[in-house]
Image (tube, rainbow, N blue to C red):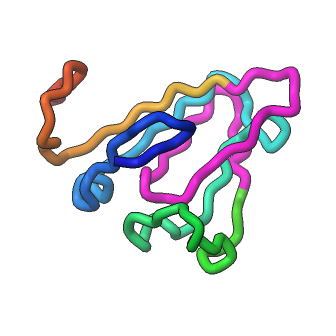
């Protein structure tokens, strides 16, 4: 389990994360001003990276802001180091975030659907 903003979450096993792809469908343009996603390229190839007091961002590479147009779709691996800042803009940054995995997840999820 992991804690983010005092909420508990689960970190799936590495083999599940490696088999997962994330689709981010942008209902609004995203950029640095409205809190667009920042990623560190190729960091998904390093496995699960813990962000704790020992984490040194500089050893993983340069952050890149993902500027995405309205209606654009961004594909990413959930293992990639990613973050966003609060918006300093009046513009929205609505995104539909969907994850797909071709491995059996050992949990009984209410929203699980098998796609054939």
Can you say whether 23 is above or below 96 in the image?
A: below
Q: Which part of the image, by quadrant, shows the C terminus? A: top left
Question: Which residue is at 70% across, 27% downward?
Answer: 93
Which residue is at the front of the view, 6 or 27? 6
Question: Which residue is at 55% across, 42% downward?
Answer: 74
Whether the magenta-drawn stretch holds residue 96 is answered as no
Question: Which residue is at 75% across, 21% downward?
Answer: 92
Q: Residue furthest bottom?
A: 59
Instruction: Find residue 1 and report its horizontal and vertical position in percent.
Output: 33, 47
Can you say whether 109 is above or below 47 in the image?
A: above
Can you say whether 103 is above or below 98 in the image?
A: below
Instruction: Find residue 57 and report its horizontal and vertical position in percent.
Output: 65, 70
What's drawn in magenta, residue-wise? 65-93
For the stretch drawn in magenta, the main secondary structure is loop
Which residue is at the front of the view, 7 or 66? 7
Which residue is at the front of the view, 87 or 65? 87
Question: Which residue is at 85% across, 38% downward?
Answer: 33
Whether the magenta-drawn stretch holds residue 84 is answered as yes
Q: How many marks?
A: 0
Instruction: Find residue 94 and report its horizontal and vertical position in percent.
Output: 64, 23
Instruction: Find residue 78 and report its horizontal and vertical position in percent.
Output: 43, 51
> On the picture, is 111 further left or further right than 106?
right
């Amino acid at each position: 389990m992991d804690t983010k903003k005092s909420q508990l979450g689960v970190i799936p096993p590495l083999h599940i994360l490696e088999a997962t792809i994330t689709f981010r469908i942008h209902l609004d343009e995203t950029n640095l001003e409205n809190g667009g996603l920042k990623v560190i390229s190729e960091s998904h190839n390093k496995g699960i990276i813990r962000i704790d007091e020992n984490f040194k961002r500089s050893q993983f590479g340069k952050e890149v802001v993902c500027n995405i147009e309205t209606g654009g779709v961004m594909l990413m691996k959930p293992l990639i180091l990613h973050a966003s800042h609060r918006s300093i803009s009046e513009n929205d940054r609505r995104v539909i975030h969907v994850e797909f995995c071709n491995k059996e997840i050992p949990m009984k999820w209410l929203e699980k659907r098998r796609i054939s």
